[in-house]
Amino acid sequence: HPLAAGVSVAAVALASKYAIEAWQAFKARPVVPRMRKFYEGGFQPVMTRREAALILGVRERVAMEKIKEAHRRVMVANHPDSGGSDYLASKINEAKDVMLGQNKGSGSPF
């Protein structure tokens, strides 16, 4: 029995050594910021449902309430009265209209 006990102790010590090394390597890895990636591109000539969803930050198939909440949130951040762009505000409104099915991306006045 002393041989089995010795082998067991050695196995536990070896496993502990590798576990400690793995934990130290995990802690030493570089920190990757977890930021949302934003759409990098211009607007399409005629707005699609996909583009509208990207502008509002929602999925293509989402409830009307979520679309309205997202529109309000994005519009508050980009409203012309708060220093935002008239062009972006028109695109945000167009995105809401496309998502709600009120028009099919007829284009903005700009």
Image (cartoon, helix red, strand yellow):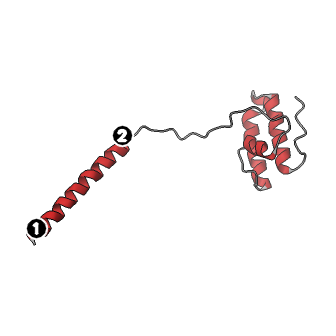
**Front residue of 42 and 84:** 42
Query: At which x and y percent is residue 84?
Result: 76, 29
Question: In the picture, which quadrant includes the C terminus?
Answer: top right
Label 1 neighbour load within 10 Å: few <14, some 14-19, many 20+: few
Q: Residue at x 90, y 45 (%)?
A: 103
Dot 1 falls on a residue whose secondary structure is helix
Q: Residue at x 74, y 40 (%)?
A: 55
Query: At which x and y percent is residue 75?
Result: 76, 38
Dot 2 falls on a residue whose secondary structure is helix
Mark 1 touching mark 2, by CB under 8 A? no
Q: What residue type is labelled 1?
A: Leu
Q: Which residue is drawn at 8% across and 69% down?
A: 2
Above or below, 74 relative to 20: above
Indicate left or right for 37 with 12 as reference: right
Above or below, 5 relative to 15: below
- Badge number at residue 3: 1
Q: Which amino acid does label 2 sit on?
A: Ala
Query: At which x and y percent is residue 99?
Result: 82, 48
Name the residue that disc number 2 marks: 28
Q: Residue at x 72, y 48 (%)?
A: 58
Residue furthest to the left in view is 2
Label 2 neighbour load within 10 Å: few <14, some 14-19, many 20+: few
Question: In the picture, which quadrant includes the N terminus?
Answer: bottom left
**Front residue of 34 and 48:** 48
How far apart are the alpha carbons under marks 1 and 2?
38 Å
Give the quarter of the image for residue 73.
Answer: top right
Residue furthest to the bottom in view is 1
**Front residue of 108 and 68:** 108
For marks 1 and 2 on the same chain, the one whose residue lies earlier in the sequence = 1
Indicate left or right for 7 with 104 as reference: left
**Front residue of 99 and 73:** 99
Choose mark 1 or mark 2, whichever is in front: 1
